[in-house]
Amino acid sequence: MTTGRYTVGIDFGSESGRAVLVDCADGRELASAVYPYQNGAFDESLPAPDDDILLETGWALQDPRDYVRTVQKTVPRLLAESGVDPADVIGVGVDFTACTMLPTTTDGVPLCLLDEFRREPHAWVKLWKHHAAQPEADRINATAAERSEPWLSRYGGKISSEWFFPKALQILVEAPSVYRAADRLIEAADWIVWRLTGIETRNSCTAGYKAMWSKQDGFPPRAYFAALDPRFTDVVDEKMSRQISSIGGRAALLSDEAAAWTGLVPGTPVAVANVDAHVSAPAATVTGPGTLVVIMGTSNCHILLGTGPAVVEGMCGVVEDGVVPGLYGFEAGQSAVGDIFAWFAAQGVPPEYLEAARRRETDIHSVLEQEAAALRPGESGLLALDWWNGNRSVLVDADLTGLVIGLTLATRPHEIYRTLIEATAFGTRMIVDAFESGGVSVDRIVACGGLPQKNKLLMQIYADVTGREFAVAASQQAPALGSAMFAAVAAGAAAGGYASIVEAAERMARLGTERYRPSRDAHAAYEPLYREYVRLHDLFGRDPGSVMKTLKRMRDQIGEARSA
Amino acid sequence: MTTGRYTVGIDFGSESGRAVLVDCADGRELASAVYPYQNGAFDESLPAPDDDILLETGWALQDPRDYVRTVQKTVPRLLAESGVDPADVIGVGVDFTACTMLPTTTDGVPLCLLDEFRREPHAWVKLWKHHAAQPEADRINATAAERSEPWLSRYGGKISSEWFFPKALQILVEAPSVYRAADRLIEAADWIVWRLTGIETRNSCTAGYKAMWSKQDGFPPRAYFAALDPRFTDVVDEKMSRQISSIGGRAALLSDEAAAWTGLVPGTPVAVANVDAHVSAPAATVTGPGTLVVIMGTSNCHILLGTGPAVVEGMCGVVEDGVVPGLYGFEAGQSAVGDIFAWFAAQGVPPEYLEAARRRETDIHSVLEQEAAALRPGESGLLALDWWNGNRSVLVDADLTGLVIGLTLATRPHEIYRTLIEATAFGTRMIVDAFESGGVSVDRIVACGGLPQKNKLLMQIYADVTGREFAVAASQQAPALGSAMFAAVAAGAAAGGYASIVEAAERMARLGTERYRPSRDAHAAYEPLYREYVRLHDLFGRDPGSVMKTLKRMRDQIGEARSA
């Protein structure tokens, strides 16, 4: 029989949801469970039986029922596996991808679950990587620049098509009836908390990073929204809320319905919703300035804490109290990292590597990594731009694409693989340099997420390219652990939790023992390669008339003509 | 029992030799035979038992014994298969890749067959695509430019590392003892004629296109060679010959030894050696101006006839009487075409395409072609520079490399495949445009070689990109047929052959019935893509400080450091 105090953290990802049950005393994970979403992330058609409805390029949707199923399938397994008494579970916390948003009725029913709207793509959940709202993002940026909106500088001068208002405006422009029927437009993070507690709240993290809200100034003014579209004037008051709950707080208590889904006790405190990347920082022990947290997975997200505001080119955002109360939380990102390696493994590697993987009883990534590890920096003559899914920081441009240069008849797949790793490392280096140019120092780096545990070559290349030591968070599921830590804060010290996330991190978070230290030689060898990367970056990334942008425009026009 | 008059043409390629026996009356191929070279083209090590001797990057060698074996293995099969009486074979013609050259003794014994030099890479045959003499080519070009050598303009202002004197100079610089021991430096084309007849001759085609010789001015002056290296001053008189035999003529008569190898009659006339691309023009019916012949295979070679000299940027060369007596023959080329598609099929295509090929009982190229055919120009958003093996025309730079831009997470292999085809078509279009800018008109195009028969999509894309009709030579082995036609000219009209190659072409060469006509829509759609290709071409190809050139220099330095 276990005793003590426990919390549950649930991390809602792109393809699955993952829950952990941890001991509040030391963060030890007693049980974990994963639910692969039945409908995953869909980008070609709506799910059956409506899979005759095709989606345009750049769309990426989810099914909100998968979130509820995650709760229903994972939490009971945690309790069963750990043997913990539900009465000893003192809190539940959740984190989500963001901005992942959906339209609902006043009662929180997703419009996509109503027969009337089921076959309308705009009624479904727009996943973070839905990129089809780029025209709306362009309009939002241009209008903000024209009006010299002061909030724009907090986001590096440009907001992304992945964010809340571009997605909301796309619904208004392309599906006005869905927009009209949507009583609420809400982050999926807040929606699942609503489903768990019966009470609608809005968290400060997504409001700040994804919806241009700040603690001091609130949302942009009505006149700004009116300038985008008269029908959009009152989007905040009609569809959202100005009452923003700070992260680190308690949203509400677990409802009877959600208690029945999970086996937890009704009335268990539920934390204010949070974002996967941001919640990972304290889970990786980082609650102060100087240490960059890189959450490495399908994409990279970078979290850095500072003592004051700063203007950093192309950052995703800076939010006071956005990560840790009392500090300014900076966010940056790379739109595709593991996704690029996965793309390459699936689309670009001939059978011999798969056969080698079978022979060595490993996977194709390990084979590529082993072969690539023998190469020196620059030896292949290859260089790539890591923009397979656009550039989130420093350029903030979803229209950018990937590039490989230096190919010859002797080029081998593992050389390209290494080049892709290096390209993402150069992308991280660009972000580190941008932070330091903006006066926010980066002394060391802590990595977490799925990739660092899998690929040592990747970690060493990142250390060599950035010239900084990398540590790795001990937990392989930092977001879920972070959510469990915020659950302990929501429970409060009196209940056996903690008074603050800083205290929770001191007790519940740990680093692994491994350190990746930059090799002096490799760092020196990467300097000239990085300079060439920066040249390509500026050549294709900063010129709106570049070949890359022109090709993308042509592709979009052909796509539109084809679907018209 | 067949009657009539016949000739044998032998085409010596990069991986195999191919012979045909044709009827002089109408060019009908009665028999053909292929000999795959035992040692192929080797670029990693010398052949066994000396395969512990590794080759540096850029090397490509052949074994001269493979040429003799080709003769020994193919010609007897032609006679056996066709049932033709050897007495009715009135001539033998050969064509070769070029510049493919070797050092020999006074008697024509290749140095690589002497025990003393067997383990010395420089003693072997340097294949056309041996690119390691780029430093020597650079020196040759710079010295020629300094001295304002008048012959330089005949070669578009720049000669290639693939040519005769860069290869010869590389031997001198890197293996002076081989250079000293070489009584003769000779094109493999002329060497095999020497082996067939016992008499050394030098053909006007390789002398003109690959060794800076012209009918009017001969070779460059001694002072020029002296400026390259004092030991190189008398390279022509010491190692070569100033007596150049015009193509279309007779070299000598078949020796007793070669008659024994082949089953042909001693004394059969043997034509002056020729080059595979050049000999293909008459085999593709082209003996006059206005029609570009594109020989499409592992690389593309372009032959165009003009009535006078002209300065065309980056041409391989213009030689009076170089292709057809009485006309100026222009040559241009693309260093890799089929080689790029083969590289992609081997290095860049995942197993599902191979499985589809098995299911459909076809090959991977057909599967890629079928999938790629459904795409519209520009639809994939991809664009490539076709420089996997450098650029032979218009830029004449072996240090250029391949590039792919526009990659996304949705990019599929058949999209890349189509993009590679398009890139090679754009490369041909650049050459067509250069010819027309130089005042040499290109009204229509005739394709021959291995690719046109295999890939209809490729042919249509070439027609659409160039905006010109493509016909295809009827013969699938145009070079061998061309050699057989020159054999008929070497035999002469009195013996049942022809007085000139023009007459031979009228009777022996035919076009296939298929025509690829440019689609107006597709041509219009390719115009903006071609403009972007030209931008990339100039961006990376014309700037010696470009990222592409810098990466290549870094790669070379690392390669040198590694092998040092």
Image: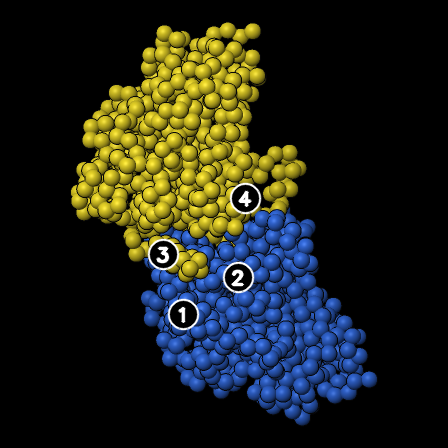
Chain colours: A yellow, B blue
Quadrant of the rendering where the C terminus of chain A is positioned: bottom left
Nearest the eye: A79 or B444: A79
User: What residue is disc 2 on?
Assistant: B374
Find out whether the residues at labels 1 and 4 contact each other: C-beta distance under 8 Å.
no
For badge 1, the amino acid type reads: Ala
Q: Which mark is residue A553?
A: 3
Q: Secondary structure at mark 3?
A: helix
Query: Identity of the amino acid at label 4?
Result: Ala
Q: Position of residue A61 (x, y in %)?
A: 45, 41
The chain that hosts pointer 2 is B
Q: Amino acid at mark 2?
A: Ala
Subunit of mark 1? B
- Indicate the chain on which mark 3 is placed: A
Quarter of the picture holding the N terminus of chain A: top right
* Rendered location of residue A122, percent (x, y): 40, 45
Marks 1 and 4 belong to one chain? no
**Mark 1 and mark 4: span between their CA atoms?**
40 Å
Q: Are marks 4 and 2 on the same chain?
A: no
Do the residues at pointers 3 and 2 share their chain?
no
Could you tell me which secondary element the residue under label 4 belongs to? loop
Residue located beneath label 4 in the image: A48
Q: Give the vertical position of A438 relative to A416 (above or below).
A: above
Q: Are marks 4 and 2 in contact (CB under 8 Å)?
A: no
